[in-house]
Amino acid sequence: MTVVGPFGLSVRDHALETDVQAGLAAVEEGLIEATKSGVPFITEAAQHLVRAGGKRFRPLLVMLAAQFGDPHAPGVVPSAVVVELTHLATLYHDDVMDEANVRRGVPSANARWDNSVAVLTGDFLFARASHILADLGPEAVRIQAEAFERLVTGQILETAGPQEGDDPIAHYLDVIAGKTGSLIAVAGRFGAMMSGADENVVDILTQYGERIGTAFQLADDVLDIASDSHESGKTPGTDLREGIVTLPVLRLRARAACGGSPEDLALCALLDGDLTDDARHAEALAGLRAHPALEEARRDTIRYADEARNALAPLPDCAAKEALSYLCDSVVHRAG
């Protein structure tokens, strides 16, 4: 097997490996070109996270989905650049909302400069993505617009929180489907669509993208608790410190609400307190790492990854289908 791309996908087929690596290299060139400006400061800020690297999960999915048509079709690489630029733009905005200090192992844009620069740089990346998208046709514009609406709606739902009577876990999974699943679904859809694949193949890879996108975010939830900064590229427990409720916390609260142990209740009380204090934050992080709720969140990740794999069943057996199945394993592996 050969490892392909920063995400670390292993593939067995030499032709597929060559195509995917060439596609990802072209995407990197496209990202650098798309983030250039006549104003040097804008170029520096826009390329800050591009040059920091990243998993390039979405472009990788575009490249694999394109294997079900013509992977060298002219729209494949630009569509991957669009999806990754959109993702990068959301990271600039997310770091402002979360007051994060580290992203991909480097200072976040808001920490290096300030919130205004980070927000405006994210807007700049959205604009550049839209410029490229316009050349891909009105259907691509519509698909991206619908996904972006879902993404923003998911963010708003997360900010507003569940309404009275809502199941917090079901609400959270809806948020994740919007915030993360929608754009990863577009990656699968664009790859298949731009390559000229059959419509039923486009639909299958869109469904696959949505499910693996949810698994991908749930794996990040687990990583935020279980990993160190070297593994995740950001400060452990960032979500905890900022009061962002993720699946392990929701699983803990569900246990506490249904006759939980004194230890469950004590940990919930700690999480509901001020976690900007380093000692309390460290105690809460250690408590969650040792709690069964973290393992429950891992099982949720596995369930969505399995759903993504099962969605591939109608596709013809080929190296790309096998690689997409391995991608499910890679996502699960990230969650331990």
Image (cartoon, grey):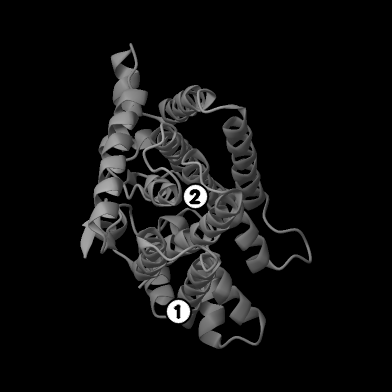
Q: What is the residue that sits farthest to the top in this orientation?
A: 38
Where is residue 138 drawn, in percent x and y?
61, 27
Among the 4 quarters of the image, the one containing residue 164? bottom right
Quadrant in which the C terminus is drawn: bottom left
Do we see residue 275 in this rendering? no
- Nearer to the camera, 109 or 325: 325
Among the 4 quarters of the image, the one containing residue 109? top left
Do we see residue 323 in this rendering? yes
User: Relative to 230, is 310 above or below?
Assistant: below
Amino acid carrying label 1: it is: Glu
Residue in view at x 31 percent, y 21 percent? 43
- Which secondary structure lies at badge 1? helix
Q: Nearer the viewer, mark 2 or mark 1?
A: 2
Q: Residues within 10 Å of mark 2 (few under 14, many from 20)?
A: many
Disc with the residue nearer the chain's start (2 vs 1): 2
Among the 4 quarters of the image, the one containing residue 145? top right
- Which secondary structure lies at badge 2? helix
